[in-house]
Image (cartoon, coloured by chain):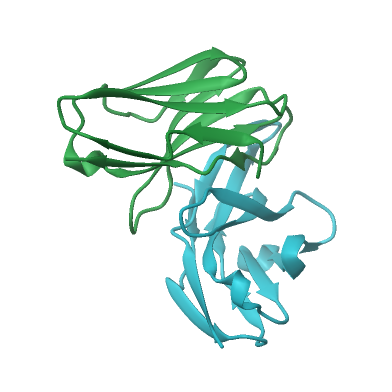
Amino acid sequence: AQSVTQPDIHITVSEGASLELRCNYSYGATPYLFWYVQSPGQGLQLLLKYFSGDTLVQGIKGFEAEFKRSQSSFNLRKPSVHWSDAAEYFCAVVMNYGGSQGNLIFGKGTKLSVKP
Amino acid sequence: ETGVTQTPRHLVMGMTNKKSLKCEQHLGHNAMYWYKQSAKKPLELMFVYSLEERVENNSVPSRFSPECPNSSHLFLHLHTLQPEDSALYLCASSPPGTGSEQYFGPGTRLTVT
């Protein structure tokens, strides 16, 4: 079965430091890829998405992600973290069944803490 | 603010109660979803409606009953719930098109006592 793995449950970084959150998926073809962020008590907000084309995609709030087909990965990065980035981050994929679309499959999330 | 609203934001109910969760979107989307988010578990897709017809039910217990009267509104009717049903229930909607991203509401925090 298709799955999404976020190997880091909780990450703590210092404000101003760089950030990389990992995401791997298991599927034979290229899915559609998403990163969402969830602040406490809130719903999920889309940060960025990859469908095709340039494998480095830019999102909101200074985030970017790179799709690496050979590694089945879609890691999220930010060069300088702000205290307001503390939240939980979810990687998600939609399997592309040759034109028809499957449902979003989410990873378990990575909680980001930012220390001053 | 994503354009998807959910009410109530918090709900406490006993196991014998009947309540309903409401979701509303005015984004022109044609698909709506219910998800369950429990601690330490991935988001679980419960129901999918496309053009007001249910297209997916991921083996959800019958004590959860969805209703989609039109493309802007989605309900989740609850009855005789169990304590393990306590969770954050998220509604989402998406526009037409392959690979369209989903827009989420803020969720309803449900506690079953």
Q: Which chain is cyan?
A: A
Position in image of residue A82 (x %, y %): 65, 78
Position in image of residue A10 (x %, y %): 44, 74
- Residue in view at x 60 percent, y 42 percent: A95
- Report the front residue among B91 and B1: B1
- Report the front residue among A50 and A88: A88
* Residue B71 sits above or below residue B12 on the image: above
The reply to whether residue B34 is in sight is yes
Position in image of residue B65 (x %, y %): 35, 20
The reply to whether residue B79 is in sight is no
Q: Is residue B27 left or right of residue A106?
A: right
* Residue B21 sits above or below residue A16 on the image: above
Q: Is residue A97 left or right of residue B89?
A: right
- Residue in view at x 42 percent, y 71 percent: A9
- Residue in view at x 67 percent, y 87 percent: A16
Position in image of residue A116 (x %, y %): 56, 88
* Residue A8 sits above or below residue A18 on the image: above
- Within the image, what quadrant is residue A68 found in? bottom right
Q: Is residue B67 left or right of residue B72?
A: left
All told, the count of numbered labels is 0
Q: Which chain is green?
A: B
- Report the front residue among A3 and A105: A105
